Image: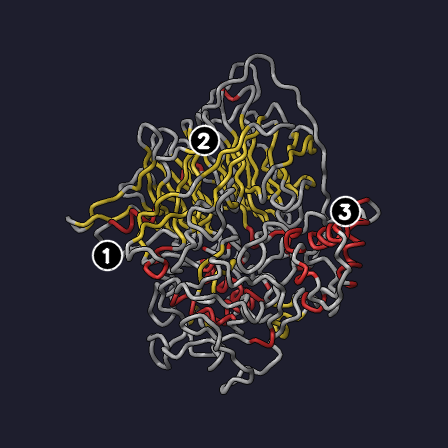
Amino acid sequence: MNRFRLIGIVIVLILLLIVSACGGSPPTPTGEETAVAPSGTAQIAKNSSSSSPIAISDDDALLVVVNNLNDSITVINVAGDANAKIAEITVGDEPRSVVLTPDKQRAYITNQASATVSVIDLTTNQKTQDIPVGVEPYGIALTPDGSRAYVTNSASNTVSVIDTASNAVAATINIPGIQPRGIAITNNNGGTGQQFVYVTQFLSQPTASGGVNLDQGSEGKVFVLSTTDDAQIQGVITLAAHDTGFAADRTKFGGTATDPTFAYPNQLQAIVLKNGRGYLPNVAASPEGPVKFNVDTQAFLSVFDVAAKSELSSGTINLHAAVKTQTFTPKLFVANPWAIAFKHASNDGYVVSAASDVLVKVTLDDNGIPSVVTNTADGDTTRVALIDVGKNPRGVVINNADTRAYVMNYISKDVSVIDLSASPEVELARVQSADLPAEGSDGAKFLLGNELFNSSRGEFDEGVAERLSNEGWQSCASCHPDGLTDGVVWAFASGPRKTVPLNGTFSPVNQTGDQRILNYSAVFDEVEDFELNIRGVSGGQGLIVLEGTTDQDPNVKAFDPPNAARVQLHVNGIAAWDAIVAWTQSRIPSPVSPYNGVDPNSELGLQIAQGSQLFTQANCQACHGGAKWATNQVDFPRSSPFAETITTGVDPEPPVGQLARFLRQVGTFDPANPLEKNANNFQALGQLGYNPPSLLSIYAFSPYLHNGACLTLDCVLENQTHRDAGGVTGVLEDPAARAALVQFLISIDASTAPVSP
């Protein structure tokens, strides 16, 4: 994709305009779905608008789907079940979401990596314009009359408001949170007058008395805007942690063998409005130990009351809990809920399970509270109502007739057509939206690595399946969305550890020859070592097998013997771990800095330049130099016996080996801190120091440090031992100097020239 060419041309527009409100009293926000166009006005959309990678026209005739991996969109004729591809149109880099104007004349598409919104003329199927917006635009939604498009800019922490008559940005709204993603707009008062806009914060943030390492320590947020006031935030909806319906053995922490677990909503990717309620599928986090598949990530559907601007606390459900209670076996849990759509004339809805490749049917009661639909199977067993779709589904829309659902499948690059009038619902057809790479090509290997990283299941040439987690519970992407981080601090055997973003694992200029030592305590040296996480955390059988069998090889451990080039399962002749490594080396994007494109002669530009000089003066490059912005490197042969000294004599029980040569003392380990405990409640690793992380796009990966102790980079630099770790003292004593260095750190992305160590 073009992001990997390190294109850094980004235009940041910061305009704060106050748009005068329409006359009369503002309507009460209801979130009702259906609107009727008043006589003599512009065409009004039939439904509220929500960001999605797939959209359908109001006449149920035209479908437009985003092809993120191909930098294109596809237009499909779905009238009368034609299901025929009309055109594929190139847009910007990494398109994410699409909306259609009510008159079916235009489509607007957000391009995350190129910081633009593409405009498509649907009468000619031609791109007519790219509108510069903020950095990393993700979600987009339209007002009912189609006059304004609202775009969430996940790196800028802003919302761009586009006037669709001029296709120019009319206002930029600052969001008091991080990574705005999902967005939805009401369709009240017949679609005229004031409407309300709801924007999700992708990753949850700690509560005042909590922390990202506690089951009830963080909360999700939804920001409320008004279409008649671009200057003021109208409210903030907080989404709290909830009981998961699962128990954990916490006897080692002073609890019981059946302690109830809680999880907080996280990865708030999408939002849909229906009948005065907002619905947000999300990957909830339960980080307190032990880190075990059925008590770490959960499949939440969170609910809020539109009028009250508050969570409907009795409405949030855990989809996994419904699978737990079904009597039919084998069970398939519904990992990574990513999107949802409802029928228009009934209370039935369908949640996309991105990792398990299914839709989950839900229904709402009269108060809008969801429940999972179950069917009777084999006469006397119950089973959650699931509908098989393509690989890694990420979006769903339903036609106005309520007869068809259309599902965007990210990995298989196709659209599943679902017959909603059948009982049970079934997939009718697949429409290929973009070409797959040639069999046996590098592209095929990259796509397979992407698939296995995002899947909770897996199907292999050797005739086995469901190896990636226990009953489809989770995928690698459950904690590493897009290969990055969920911002959660988990209780691992080595201690509390924040999920590491994987974009800095390999050097962007030497992808096969320059790899970091892995994890905060240098406990792994190969990507293949995460076979241990598939088995021990996700509960899967794994991918490394004994010669001539599909039995898992029991001799899998870190360091010795090496896990690369072991006997593996295959897909289409490609070794599974080889594919995951190839994808990790070259296909994980580094978020674009919000400062990309800043005038170097502006006040901010000069401060960034000063920070760059201070970076080298303080010798920060001793730990954070080079193309991957981290100097630790696998500089030894992988062999058995192992060439490096493995240190195991530090406190954790059972002992955890680490490569002490690569650790650095930065003053962030406090043995007296009760949080510095591992999964067995023994003292965590940290006495010998930590493995320096990559600074590539570091601005995007709060909280910071191994234990998430700092929410900001300013906090990181308050630690004198850390800021003097390069061996040069005094350079960063002045708070103004530290402030300049922080601005430089925020500016670092794939387009930044690295500093040599």
Q: Quadrant of the N terminus?
A: bottom right
Q: Secondary structure at mark 3?
A: loop
**Could you give the CA–CA distance between mark 1 and mark 2, rounded to whole angstroms?**
38 Å
Q: Which mark is residue 329?
A: 1
Q: Secondary structure at mark 2?
A: strand
**Could you give the CA–CA distance between mark 1 and mark 3, rounded to whole angstroms?**
57 Å
Disc 3 or disc 2, which is closer to the eye? 2
Residue for badge 3 = 598
Give how far across and how far down residue 136 sits, in percent: 63, 46
Give how far across and how far down residue 238 sits, in percent: 48, 36
From where the camera sits, is residue 157 visible?
A: yes
Rendered view: 689 above or below 501: below
**Left/right of residue 270 with respect to residue 668 in the rendered view:** left
| 1 or 2: tag closer to the N-terminus | 2
Give how far across and how far down residue 160 sits, in percent: 64, 36
Q: Quadrant of residue 682?
A: bottom left
Q: Residues within 10 Å of mark 2 (few under 14, many from 20)?
A: some
**Could you give the CA–CA distance between mark 3 and mark 2, rounded to whole angstroms?**
38 Å
User: Which residue is found at the position 40% from the left and 60% from the top?
Assistant: 291
Disc 1 or disc 2, which is closer to the eye? 2
The residue nearer to you, when weighing 742 against 753, is: 742
User: Which residue is found at the position 54% from the left and 55% from the top?
Assistant: 708
Residue for badge 2 = 310
Q: Are marks 1 and 3 in contact (CB under 8 Å)?
A: no
Q: Quadrant of the C terminus?
A: bottom right
Q: Which residue extends farthest left?
A: 380
Amino acid tagged 1: Thr
Q: Are marks 1 and 2 in contact (CB under 8 Å)?
A: no
From where the camera sits, is residue 76 visible?
A: no
Amino acid tagged 2: Ser
Q: Quadrant of residue 652?
A: bottom left
Q: Which residue extends farthest top?
A: 24
